[in-house]
Amino acid sequence: MLAACYLAVATSHAGTDPVVIGAIAVAAATVVRALPVPGGEPVSLLLAIAAATLTALATGPATGFGGGPAALLAAVCGGGALVGLRAASYDWPSRFVHFTAGVALPLTAAAPLVYALGRLLS
């Protein structure tokens, strides 16, 4: 993830703002998705995307990226994190690989989204 963040910052004229917004959104979506929520998987998915989007309320103005673009970026990165978590869940037999993939894949899935949307929105 650090390498992906570095590449996103180094190759984009958007700077570090999209990387900060995306990384915090991924973290929020991943944590909320791990919580047991009444209502099952659909409610958990919606809450995870909402949590990722809500992080933009703090990170958008703090980075100077803007509220609207930050919310869009955070929501898409949260969705990318959920795709990565879903892909990691298919590695059932190996606990070590599952735990490492459960951390790495959400961040890896969101990295290209940070790059593309960071360039587009800035």
Image (tube, grey):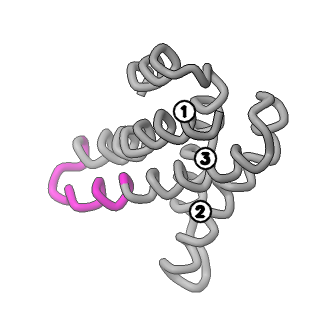
| Residue placed under numbered mark 2 in the picture | 48
Residue at 37% in and 39% down: 108
For marks 3 and 1, give the CA distance.
11 Å
Badge 3: residue crowd in 10 Å (few <14, some 14–19, many ≥20)? many
Which of marks 1 and 3 precedes in the sequence?
Answer: 3
Q: Secondary structure at mark 1?
A: helix
For marks 2 and 1, give the CA distance.
25 Å
Is residue 14 or residue 83 the one in the foreground?
A: 14
Q: Of the numbered discs in the image, which one, if any, rests on residue 119?
A: 1
Which of marks 1 and 2 precedes in the sequence?
Answer: 2
**Does residue 85 appear left or right of residue 28 in this picture?**
left
Furthest residue in direction left, as rendered: 93
Residue at 57% in and 30% down: 19
Residue 81: x and y in percent read 46, 51
**Does residue 115 appear left or right of residue 92 in this picture?**
right
Q: Secondary structure at mark 2?
A: helix
| Residue placed under numbered mark 3 in the picture | 73
User: In the image, is residue 91 part of the stretch drawn in magenta?
Assistant: yes
Numbered disc in front, either 2 or 1: 1
Residue 69 to residue 11: above or below: below
Badge 2: residue crowd in 10 Å (few <14, some 14–19, many ≥20)? many
Q: Callout 1, which amino acid? A: Arg
Badge 1: residue crowd in 10 Å (few <14, some 14–19, many ≥20)? some
**Does residue 85 appear left or right of residue 88 in this picture?**
right
Q: What range of the chain is rendered magenta?
A: 84-96
Residue 3: x and y in percent read 39, 19
Which of marks 2 and 3 precedes in the sequence?
Answer: 2
Q: Callout 3, which amino acid? A: Leu
**Residue 1 quadrant:** top left
Q: Are marks 2 and 1 in contact (CB under 8 Å)?
A: no
Residue 54: x and y in percent read 74, 54
Is residue 44 or residue 76 the one in the foreground?
A: 76
